[in-house]
């Protein structure tokens, strides 16, 4: 038998939870590094130091035009932040919807400000809106996943 089989049940549960949190923390760190790489690399087709402070301007343009603008700008910004909403609550079980909104807002705003100051990309308030929506969708998926998957440490009563 394994050493884990001899541990008291509460210790095994705590050990599994700590291992899951560590894996989630490593995945969160890798995700953030990839996100920074994607968002801070200069874009060859966008002039530097442009800023859009008009909410929904680029979102509506993307919806109207469709194609690349819709897929990359609108859907891409949502998809880019969904992992944040999935991974943060996996690292910190105390995460809430409002905490995810704040985390998405701070992360996205930091990226947009850095893009503007470093003249890397177009800073756009709509990116912040879409990123927060993506983080919330990721959190919603996390909540649905946690509720739908039976926890292996809980005994089901007949």
Image (spheres, rainbow, N blue to C red):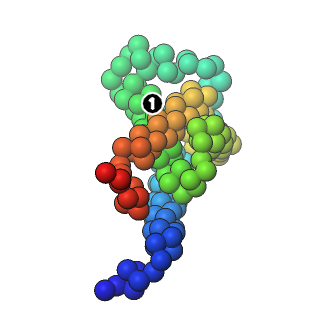
**Residue 108 lies in quadrant:** top right
Which residue is the extreme one toward the top?
64
Q: Position of residue 102 (x, y in %)?
A: 65, 40
Left or right side of 53 for 33: left
Say which residue appears at 56% left-offset and 34% top-offset: 132
Tag 1 residue: 73
Q: Position of residue 91 (x, y in %)?
A: 54, 57
Mark 1 lies on a secondary structure that is helix
Say which residue appears at 61% left-offset and 20% top-offset: 55
Q: Position of residue 126 (x, y in %)?
A: 56, 27
Which residue is the extreme one toward the front?
158
Q: Is residue 13 above or below residue 71?
A: below
Say which residue appears at 60% left-offset and 42% top-offset: 96
Say which residue appears at 51% left-offset and 47% top-offset: 84
Nearer-the-camera pick, 50 or 76 = 76
- Report if residue 123 is visible in the image: yes
Nearer-the-camera pick, 127 or 120 = 127
Left or right side of 99 for 1: left
Work out which quarter of the rendered image holds the N terminus and state it.
Answer: bottom left
Q: Is residue 155 above or below residue 67?
A: below
**Residue 117 lies in quadrant:** top right
Q: Is residue 103 above or below residue 33?
A: above
- Report if residue 37 is visible in the image: no
Q: Position of residue 76 (x, y in %)?
A: 42, 35
Nearer-the-camera pick, 36 or 24 = 24
């Amino acid at each position: 038998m394994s050493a884990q089989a001899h541990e008291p049940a509460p210790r095994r549960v705590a050990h599994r939870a700590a291992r899951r949190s560590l894996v989630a923390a490593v995945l969160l760190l890798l995700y953030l590094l990839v996100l920074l790489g994607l968002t801070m690399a200069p874009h060859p087709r966008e002039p530097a130091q442009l800023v859009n402070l008009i909410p929904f301007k680029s979102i509506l343009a993307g919806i109207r035009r469709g194609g690349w603008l819709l897929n990359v700008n609108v859907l891409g910004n949502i998809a880019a932040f969904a992992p944040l909403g999935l991974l943060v609550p996996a690292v910190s079980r105390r995460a809430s919807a409002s905490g995810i909104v704040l985390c998405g807002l701070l992360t996205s705003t930091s990226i947009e400000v850095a893009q503007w100051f470093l003249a890397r990309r177009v800073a756009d308030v709509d990116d912040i809106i879409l990123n927060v929506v993506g983080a919330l969708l990721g959190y919603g998926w996390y909540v649905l996943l946690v509720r739908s998957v039976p926890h292996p440490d809980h005994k089901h009563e007949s």
